[in-house]
Amino acid sequence: MNTPDKNDLERLDIHIPPIDEAARQAVEVRHGQLTKPPGSLGQLERLAVELAGIQGRDRPSVQRKAVIVAAADHGVATEGTSAYPQEVTTQMVLNFLHGGAAINVLARQADARVVVADMGVASDLDAHPSLYRRKVAYGTQNMRYGPAMTEAQARQALRAGLEIIETEARQGLDVLAVGEMGIGNTTASAAIVAALTGLAPEAVTGRGTGVDDQGLQRKIEVIAEALAVNQPDPQQPLEVLTKVGGLEIAGLVGIILGAAASRVAILIDGFIASTAALLAVAFNPAVKPYLLATHQSVEIGHRVILNELGLKPLFDLGLRLGEGSGAALAFHLLEAAVRILNEMATFAEAGVSGKKT
Ligand SMILES: Cc1cc2ncn([C@H]3O[C@H](COP(=O)(O)O)[C@@H](O)[C@H]3O)c2cc1C
Ligand SMILES: O=C(O)c1cccnc1
């Protein structure tokens, strides 16, 4: 038996199948037959083509939809880098479970289920049918003074993410939106993006929940110190995640890799969810074509991530919430793209003349 090398372990032994080129081509051919000038439905056409390649189906489906909101607390929240107190993480998880948060409203409108994953919230949570209780720790350590977590904790959270998406995929899932909740997690995300890209903290750090100028300056300094203390190797995504990451971010990386392994399309959300996507690609580049960018977040580092990944957002509504809110809105566009494919008449069926030669 081969001993798995470090790379296999880093890739979490996940096999991600290649995109189905034949299914993509079948959709392109059909788009050419529908009663419209070629390419005139722009990004909607691209979405249908990508979805077909991901799912391996000429007629992709968006019937079964889920939002997974991964939640955890952050030791660095004690540094005053968020405009809100840490207890809001737990309070919002309860709000998600009661159906009262923005993501619940947007998911209901799109007929998507919402499930919450406790990866490391600082308080104990009662059992609930929509809650995966996978707490790795009661929040991370403060990365300003040392690693946010141990490598074993990072691996545990990654594995939990894989297991959660496996369970969800078994129940039937065509499209997944990934979201998060964790006071302080724009600080962790900015540190991860700075570590992976080599950019200065100020180039990737925004106001998160709305810190003032002084708060933003403090946030940048804390991130710079965390990077100086921890010295994460940009070539080692597991090390970056362990040293300056978060447990919900680790869970999302597992969820994203596992979704791709199951041929589930992944709608990525704003800054934090996209940070998890950037890490997932660093772990295993084969995940890349399974990622669909949704919106452009106000958080400045989000643009950096989308550029790095070569992804183009579908819309910019000035959102800066997280929870999967922008991703859930994109369900409607995916549905439009698939309905165009299934319901439009062809030139032959409608008796419409083709382009002049
Ligand atoms: C009531 C409330 C609901 C939220 N839902 C998502 N976030 C968002 O804000 C947090 C990140 O910002 P920061 O790094 O500044 O703490 C995350 O929990 C994110 O999901 C929320 C924040 C609050 C206050
Ligand atoms: O882009 C996001 O997801 C975001 C931005 C600010 C605060 N919380 C989330």
Image (cartoon, rainbow, N blue to C red):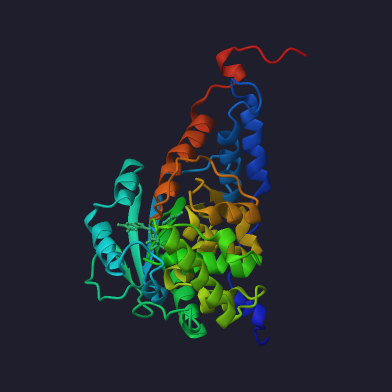
Percent coordinates x, y for residue 1 in the rendering: 66, 87
Percent coordinates x, y for residue 152 in the rendering: 49, 85
- Residue drawn at (51%, 66%), measured in percent from left and top? 220
Report the label total: 0
Percent coordinates x, y for residue 183 in the rendering: 36, 66
Q: In the figure, is residue 325 to the left or right of 264?
A: left
- Residue drawn at (39%, 49%), measured in percent from left and top? 325
- Residue drawn at (64%, 52%), measured in percent from left and top? 307
Nearer to the camera, 24 or 103: 103
Nearer to the camera, 118 or 221: 221
Q: In the figure, is residue 186 to the left or right of 198?
A: left
Percent coordinates x, y for residue 228 in the rendering: 59, 79
Could you tell me if residue 189 is visible in this image? yes
Q: In the figure, is residue 124 to the left or right of 294?
A: left
The image quadrant where one finds the C terminus is: top right
Q: Residue reaching furthest right? A: 357
Could you tell me if residue 254 is visible in this image? no
Quadrant for residue 312, please give it. Answer: top right
- Quadrant in which ligand 2 is drawn: bottom left
Q: Residue reaching furthest front? A: 214
Nearer to the camera, 93 or 284: 93
